[in-house]
Amino acid sequence: MFIKEMSRHECSSVVQAGHLARLACCNEGRPYVVPITYAFTGNCIYCFSMPGQKIDWLRANPKVCLQVDEFAGERQWKSVLVFGRYQELPPEGQWGRECMHAWSLLEARPNWWEPGGLKPAPQGVATSSPHVFFCVDIEGMTGRAAYEGEA
């Protein structure tokens, strides 16, 4: 097995092919990592969540990192880190169109509201949905790939 650095194009291909990432954020020196469904287009990764710790932390510190993995076997994989900034997309005002764009991209995926929309405790019935759409404006990507055989 050998490991190689991936180009920006190769990293983008892995992110484009995926739909589940690990989102990492940090608040007051404490890291927090959660799985999240995403859609990738242009220089943005679009996501959805319900209010909670993740959104509170992202609002406090918009610097984020996402990890996207692709596995073809135990000794053959690709792993990409995406660095960027959190941008909330409220449905009204200047972000309204981009919020609808995010929604249209995400709803094309099966079960797109999972895991961002599910909570471990029973939730009451709400008269309106407090959901949050956001994007990660990509500032950089890096990746590594493992392959069977020789370099």
Image (cartoon, rainbow, N blue to C red):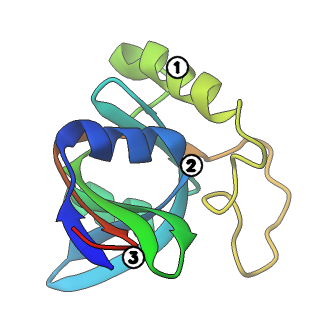
Residue 74 visible in the current orientation: yes
Q: In this view, does 148 lie to the left or right of 9?
A: right
State the image quarter where residue 146 is shown. Answer: bottom left
Indicate the amino acid at tag 1: His
Question: Residue lying furthest bottom in this view?
Answer: 30
Indicate the amino acid at tag 3: Val
The answer to which of marks 3 and 1 sits earlier in the sequence is 3
Find disc 3 in the rendering and name its residue.
33
State the image quarter where residue 57 is shown. Answer: bottom left
Of residues 135 and 42, the one nearer the viewer is: 42
Q: In this view, does 121 lie to the left or right of 96?
A: right
Given contact means CB atoms under 8 Å apart, are the residues at marks 3 and 1 in contact?
no
In the displayed structure, 34 sits above or below 82; it is below
Badge 1, how many Cα within 10 Å: few under 14, some, many 20+? Answer: few
Find disc 1 in the rendering and name its residue.
101
Indicate the amino acid at tag 2: His
Task: Classify the position of the C terminus by image quarter.
Answer: bottom left
For the residue labelled by badge 1, is the local secondary structure a helix, a strand or a loop? Answer: helix
Of residues 21 and 8, the one nearer the viewer is: 8
How many dots with numbers? 3
Given contact means CB atoms under 8 Å apart, are the residues at marks 2 and 1 in contact?
no
- Residue at 14% x, 84% y is 29
Q: Residue 19 carries which label?
A: 2
The answer to which of marks 3 and 2 sits earlier in the sequence is 2
